[in-house]
Amino acid sequence: MNNDYREKRRPENAELRRRIDKLLIEGSNFIEKNLSDLDIADYRYEMSEAVEELSLDRETVYQLVEDYIIQILKAKVTFYEQIHKLKLDKLENRALDYTDIRNLAHKNLGVVRNLRIKDAEKLLKIIMEAEDLDYMRLCVKALEISAVKLNPLCAYETLRLIEVKNSL
């Protein structure tokens, strides 16, 4: 979508920039290595499909995609926390309650279906249905990679704001 994110970077955010660059470079390899069965490593989002099918203008769909990116990057922490909680429950032989993680995945699944983001749709379906916690974790990482690829500048700014908020 928008690849001019390098132009708006500030020197004081070098570590965050490095992480996004690394995520963009290594993301497809990560997905291919760990989730090759999903055939999403080389997926490229086509906004025109959402524009046509939803009868919305490009700018509106672009804004909705940015909102989705922000939502996923904020939700990834919750996904990881819920997977960690489930792993602890499993270790302590407690009943595993997938309700919270499935609800969060379901909420985001509706958004990606509307926006026709096909790689994220596959990943969220797995998160909703899987019981393999390690595989779910891989899918959450792939979901983050997918979101960053959609718009690196939006992802960069969102991650920067999350870091600032967490430092307060």
Image (cartoon, rainbow, N blue to C red):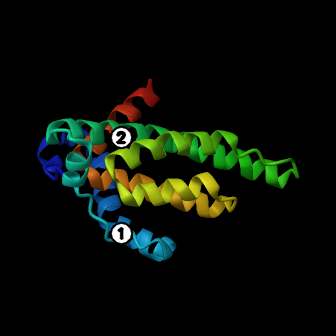
Residue 125 occupies quadrant: bottom right
Percent across and percent down for residue 105 are 54, 45
The residue at the point 40 percent across, 33 percent down is 162
Q: Is residue 40 above or below residue 16?
A: below
The residue at the point 69 percent across, 41 percent down is 99
Q: CA distance from mark 1 to mark 2?
A: 20 Å
Q: How many marks?
A: 2
Quadrant containing the C terminus in the rendered view: top left
Type of amino acid at the residue the image marks with label 2: Tyr
The residue at the point 11 percent across, 46 percent down is 7
The residue at the point 40 percent across, 49 percent down is 113
Say which mark, if any, is on residue 123.
Answer: none
Percent across and percent down for residue 154 are 26, 41
Q: Look at the numbered disc 1 and give the secondary structure of its residue.
A: helix
In the current view of this chain or complex, which residue is farthest to the right? 93
Which circle's residue, 1 or 2, is located before the other in the chain? Answer: 1
Q: Look at the numbered disc 2 and give the secondary structure of its residue.
A: helix
Q: Nearer the viewer, residue 59 or 132?
A: 59
Q: Nearer the viewer, residue 40 or 159?
A: 40
> Is residue 2 toward the left or the right of residue 14 in the image?
left
Decide: few, some or many residues near mark 1? Use Cα within 10 Å; few <14, some 14-19, many ≥20: many
Type of amino acid at the residue the image marks with label 1: Ser
List the residue tagged with mark 1: 28
List the residue tagged with mark 2: 68
Question: Which mark is in front, 1 or 2?
Answer: 2
Percent across and percent down for residue 44 are 27, 63
